[in-house]
Image: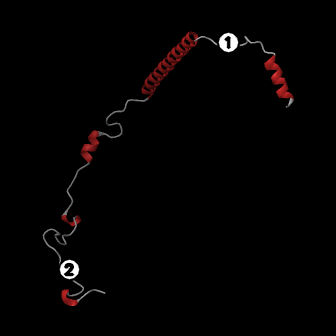
Amino acid sequence: MTDIDDDLRDVLRNRPDNTGAGEVPGFDDVWARAESTVAQRRLRTRAVGGIAAAAALVAIVFVSQLRPTEQEWQFVDPDEFASSTSWVAPSDILLPKHQFDIYGEIPVLIESTERDGGTLL
């Protein structure tokens, strides 16, 4: 055995029997302390939530006061816009030419071999 083992054995032999008897609290005390801890945590959580909501509200009000109100026609003069623009339909030259109607006209497909000619290699 080592010196540490001998010292530990001596400490355990010389220990009085009633040590630690009053250190363990009763169940009711532990339960009451746990309930008060939970109540404090809930109160603290609600307080932090309230402070965060108030800070968000203050930030929203502050930002809304800084941003100028935009007018509907801020960058465009409506009278100039209405008098200077006009629309004309495109002419037939710009439209694509009519090649064939796939639903009405089916083009003739050239077959590479005759049907009676045998298999294709």
Amino acid found under the numbered disc labelled 1: Glu
The location of residue 86, given as percent across then percent down, is: 23, 50
- Near-viewer residue (13 or 69): 13
From the image, which quarter does the N terminus lie in?
top right
Q: Residues within 10 Å of mark 1 (few under 14, many from 20)?
A: few
Q: Which residue is mark 2?
A: 109
Task: Tell how many labels.
Answer: 2
Q: Which residue is mark 1?
A: 23
Q: Earlier in the sequence, mark 2 or mark 1?
A: 1
Tell which of 35 and 108 is nearer to you: 35
| Among the 4 quarters of the image, the one containing residue 37 | top right
The amino acid beneath tag 2 is: Leu
* Residue visible at 24% across and 45% down in the picture: 83
Q: Is residue 16 above or below residue 88?
A: above
Question: In the displayed image of the protein, which residue is found farthest to the bottom?
Answer: 117
Q: Position of residue 87 (x, y in %)?
A: 22, 52
Q: Residue at x 28, y 44 (%)?
A: 81
Label 2 residue SS: loop
Residue 5 relative to residue 114: left or right: right
**Quadrant in which the C terminus appears:** bottom left
Question: Percent from the top left, x then y, of residue 101?
Answer: 16, 69
Q: Residue at x 83, y 20 (%)?
A: 10
Q: Secondary structure at mark 1?
A: loop
> Of residues 94 and 104, which is closer to you in this image?
104
**Marks 2/1: CA distance?**
102 Å
In percent of the image, x 25 and y 43: which residue is there? 82
